[in-house]
Image: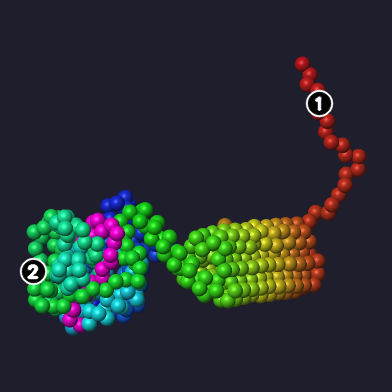
Amino acid sequence: MNVVILAAGMGKRMQSELPKVLHPLAGKPLVGHVIDTARALAPSTLCIIYGHGGELLPETLKAEDLHFARQEPQLGTGHAVSQAAPFLNDDAPTLILYGDVPLIAQQSLQRLLDIAGSDKLSILTVNLEDPTGYGRIVRENFGSGGNIQRIVEQKDATEAERAIVEVNTGIMVAPTAPLKRWLAGLSNDNAQGEYYLTDIVARAVAEGVDVVSAQPDAVWETLGVNSKVQLAQLERIHQSNVARRLMEQGVTLSDPARIDVRGTLVCGRDVSIDINAIFEGNVELADGVSVGANCIIRNSRIGRGAVIKPFCHIDDAIVGPESQIGPYARLRPGADLAEDVHIGNFVEVKNAKIAAHSKANHLAYIGDATVGSRVNIGAGTICCNYDGVNKHRTVIEDDAFIGSDTQLVAPVRVGKGATLGAGTTLTSDAPDGQLTISRPKQVTIPGWRRPVKQKKQD
Ligand code: UD1
Ligand code: MG
């Protein structure tokens, strides 16, 4: 099939410089959700109609399978679909979607496509308690379930037509060759002076083409975003759907209303997630992982049984099984922790590999480092990785013990089983198995007295 996504409108009520369909929902542009759903249907042609915001839309969304057609000026939904005509293959039906209706589900679209077959015009409709603003579905025998005859827009409707509660969601499937003919014949002789896509319905009926309808599983699938208020409402609907899916898979959520997934979260069995966790990009939590309150985890893999305590920030990192992270830990890109590694409060790890059973429990910076197994890194240890121009690597071998408040001035190596005394500034390699210490000898000055306050003389 062909898919056309309308996204030329300006979205005035968003009160923003950014074109409406590029505003993010769950971390992805509105239109990105629609494109992904369309792709899941494996269309032969996918064409996006853009206009407002200039070339920003094609530049942002650029992909091999997308065609872009500019609609300038924007003369209505029918005029918008016309811009796609040169791209559409006549031998397959055309599905029309909206860049600002992000939550439409693949299943509902499949239903609409199934009833459309190859030659029917098929419209996705919903019944609304308050249909104000929508195009109304006018059926034979008026409202009593006869065949669809036409769609009338709110502004063109009579009092009686406005009482109809079945509305046009805008989403439809049309046979492509007739669609092109109908579009070419549209007029803008209506209340808004626009070329209405909805006028193709009466034309199809006049030609004896069957017009059928299907309904989505839920009305929220068809809701559009016109304002920041509606954007926030759809974000909540989306997040609560994601939360429900996670719980159905067995994930324990302390409060399904307080989790945000902006990307893909894959969970094993017996995962539990406390409140206010944010997951971005691709995150994997293996079996038995627990995530404490207020953690932000992005593009990371957390191994089986690992415990992420509250207030951690984990970005582009790998956490090994049974590890303990936080509270208040920061794992930055390239942090790669093996099994049973402990990273405690106010420890920052960047571009560093840490082998099994090693610990940095308090206040440390481990950057550009390779750390062996069973290493203990004392509080206040800093990898001095940056000389102001270049970054250098610190290597700490298995079983080393790094005393508190040590500076490792890279490039530098701490040998197997070496011990560094607290307060050491290590500027050259420390040999295996020995104590290295760089600290002035402690002295006590005999007879020293504190100064006493002198009386002011006037
Ligand atoms: C349209 C339908 C109406 C339906 C409603 C559902 C028509 C004439 N009416 O009305 O029956 O109930 O959607 O929300 O189709 N757009 C363009 N170019 C244009 C005009 C619009 O790309 O020239 C895009 C907009 O960006 C928007 C979508 O088409 O995403 C719908 O346009 P909008 O003006 O909101 O249509 P409605 O008047 O709401
Ligand atoms: Mg409108």
Q: Residue at x 45, y 64 (%)?
A: 239
- Which image quarter: residue 186? bottom left
- Label 2 secondary element: loop
**Image quadrant in which you'd find residue 370:** bottom right
Magenta range: 118-135
Residue 99 horizontal/vertical position (percent): 29, 65
Q: Position of residue 178 (x, y in %)?
A: 13, 77
Which quarter of the rendering shows the C terminus? Answer: top right
- Number of residues whose C-alpha sits closer than 10 Å to that of mark 2, classed few (under 14), some (14–19) or many (20 or more): few
Q: Which residue is mark 1?
A: 454
Asked if residue 75 shows in the view, the reply is: no
Q: Please tell me which residue lies in front, 377 or 7.
A: 7
Mark sitting earlier along the chain (1/2): 2
User: Looking at the figure, which quarter contains the N terminus?
Assistant: bottom left
Mark sitting on residue 185: 2
Residue type of the residue flagged with mark 1: Gln
Q: Residue at x 11, y 58 (%)?
A: 190
